[in-house]
Image: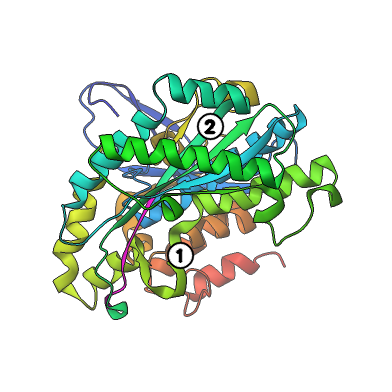
Amino acid sequence: MPEWETAENIDGETGEVVVVKGRTGKRKKIEVHLYEAEKGTDALQAGYVFLMRCASPLICPVCSSVIRAKRGEEITKAGRIMLQHGYNFIFATFTAAHSRNEMPLCDYVDHFNMAYRLLQSGKAWEKFKAKWCMKYTIKTVETTDDAEWANYKTGWHYHAHTIFFIERLPLTQDEKTEFQDKLRDLWLIALKKAYLTADKQHGCFVELPGTIFNGELVEEYSIKKLAEYISKAVGFEMTGYKTKEGRRKRRISVWKLQEMALTSKPELIPRYTEYVMAMRGINFMRWSPGLKAFCGINDISDAEIMRGEKDEWLYNIEQEKFQHVANQGGQRKLLVRAVEDGRFGVKFGLATAENGCDIETGEELSPDLWAEKTEGV
């Protein structure tokens, strides 16, 4: 919040608003709010307001899980709406050759992103788009690293996933082969211009709805069920890689690397630092202009997602008390308490954390709090 804005401090017990004007500095309280999990339903969720978060889906595991869940919901909605409007989709993965000793990750990412931009420029790409009636795309990026026990020296594996929405009937297997061959040719040309390489087989791989979902035939599903199934599956592949590891466990996620660097293997800190520096300024997900508007999806930033939704005020938490929650990683548990027991649930969880007990189990709470919980029963 800008330092010269008006700050509204809400008393945690009475709910009274005190307006303070002038230089406010840092906000000393964090609000807990209840909001509808899905508009028009009775299901409730809870969220934090005015809790400062880094909003870094590629670097922070806490923010990543929240942001990726929201983006997954957006992909699900987009997939459902596009299919209802007669669109189909193609799912593609783009990679490039990489070696641990060839170039720093920061340089590799710059060259890779350059190649992706070059891929989608020029007359050859416009002709390719027109032939296959490609209208919109959703692109995301991810990174894995060598598993130290696999004895592989390929280094970082930074790559991109893209959904191509096509305004035509689904591709047949023969058409898929033709599409993939041409896309691979264009990708190899773009990589060469960006001073990277890839073999034709692994540089670009295309999947269709009929081959991506356990071999089930598309015709076996109604359009609604198909849309939901496709969107959730693609949404998981594109946004759910927090625990993803490479094939045969040759590779590890950046979250595993982070965990090892900050706990059991401090010698990996320079390796993890290289990743953090390379991801600065990198957008985790990009949508084609106009796609979100077409699907009726509000265009909100990662930071706005982390600020949460502000509907029904529930409780105000002092920073000092919230620190006890954060110290045990109990932010999610406290929100569960808020949904289950409302304002008392927040008080109960805060007291549990302050007493050094697990918020979820509620062990060794003070007798006074238990008395308040059972009062009138």
Amino acid under disc 1: Thr
- Judge whether residue 274 can be spotted in this image: yes
Kindly identify the residue that appears in the image at 72 percent across and 46 percent down. Answer: 228
- For label 1, the SS is helix
Q: Which residues are magenta?
A: 142-148
**Does the segment drawn in magenta span residue 220?**
no
Kindly identify the residue that appears in the image at 85 percent across and 44 percent down. Answer: 222
Question: Residue 296: image x %, image y %?
Answer: 64, 24
Residue tagged by mark 2? 137
Q: CA distance from mark 2 to mark 1?
A: 25 Å
Main SS class of the magenta portion in the image: strand
Residue situated in front as seen by the camera: 67 or 9: 67
Amino acid under disc 2: Thr
Q: Residues within 10 Å of mark 1 (few under 14, many from 20)?
A: few
Residue situated in front as seen by the camera: 160 or 78: 160
Quadrant including the N terminus: top left
Tell me, what colour scheme is on the image? Answer: rainbow
Q: Is residue 151 left or right of residue 283?
A: left
Question: Residue 102: image x %, image y %?
Answer: 16, 56
Kindly identify the residue that appears in the image at 34 percent across and 29 percent down. Answer: 118
Sequence-first disc among 2 and 1: 2
Q: Which mark is residue 281?
A: none
Q: Is residue 284 left or right of residue 337?
A: left
Residue tagged by mark 1? 243
Q: Nearer the viewer, mark 2 or mark 1?
A: 2
Residue situated in front as seen by the camera: 228 or 138: 138
